[in-house]
Amino acid sequence: MNSVTMTESTAERINRLHAEVTEKEADSRNALNAALQAAWEAGGLLIEEQKRVRHTMGKGAWLLWLESNFQGTPRTAQRYMRLARTLTDPSFVRGLSLRQAYERLGIATEPKRRGEAVVLGRLPPHVSLATKLVRTLRSPKTCALMTPGHRATYQGDLRPLYERLRALFEN
């Protein structure tokens, strides 16, 4: 009878630890996603600020502005900006660490220690192409060209893609 009680006690402990693992795993995933979102948003703000600084103070003033105003390194700012330029939506890399997302997007990073370089595959080509297409369609140059004639041309050019994508989303 003592071994049955011991087994029940062990089972209870195992289940408690399993619940703890599940909770910590969810916390970790949420923290990773929040870090990616924050880096992506910071990158977007840095891009806008860089445009403003270069326009008002000249091209060479950007590094001085970073040194005076940004608490990270210029390299970190570059990575954040590249992340924002590369992704229209950070959900494409949801669940990855920031370092893993950089690796997947081809954004250079230094390994934490020699021999710790993590090798991940790049994002699938369709994700990269979709991001480029959305970025192009949202760009001020493209919007300026969106006269009714250009709109009809874009619609004609993109109609086959639209039909294929629509089939994916409607099924």
Image: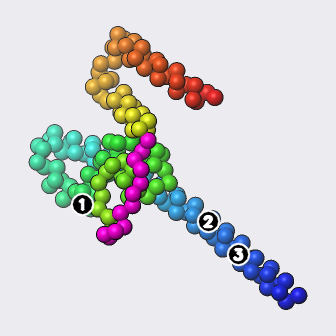
Image quadrant of residue 71?
bottom left
Question: What's under tag 3, amino acid-wise?
Answer: Ile
Say what amino acid the circle numbered 2 marks: Glu
Work out how far the residue at label 1 is from the one at label 2, CA to CA, in angstroms: 34 Å
Foreground pick, 113 / 158: 113
Considering depth in this image, is 26 or 158 the residue closer to the camera?
Answer: 158
In the rendered view, tell whether residue 119 sits above or below residue 130: below
Question: Can you identify the residue that label 1 sits on?
Answer: 73
Residue depicted at x 70% and y 75%: 14
Residue at screen point 67% across, 70% down:
18
Residue at image coords 67%, 68%: 19
Picture quarter with the N terminus: bottom right
- Element under disc 3: helix
User: Picture coordinates of residue 143 (x, y %)?
Assistant: 33, 23
Residue 41 in sight here: no
Mark 2 / mark 3, whichever is N-terminal: 3
The answer to which quarter of the image holds residue 86 is: top left
Picture layout, residue 149 above or below residue 171:
above
Taking the view exactly as shown, the residue that stands out farthest to the right is 1
Label 1 with label 2: CB-CB less than 8 Å = no
Give the residue at mark 2: 23
| Element on which disc 1 rests | loop
Residues drawn in magenta: 113-124
Please tell me which of labels 3 and 1 falls first in the chain.
Answer: 3
Instruction: Inspect the image, locate mark 1, and give the three-letter code of the amino acid beneath it.
Output: Thr
- Residue 67 pos. (x, y %): 18, 59
Q: Residues within 10 Å of mark 2 (few under 14, many from 20)?
A: few
- Magenta region, main secondary structure: loop
Looking at the image, which residue is at 72% across and 72% down? 15
Pointer 3: what residue?
A: 14
Q: Position of residue 31 (x, y in %)?
A: 49, 60
- Residue 163, labelled with which disc? none
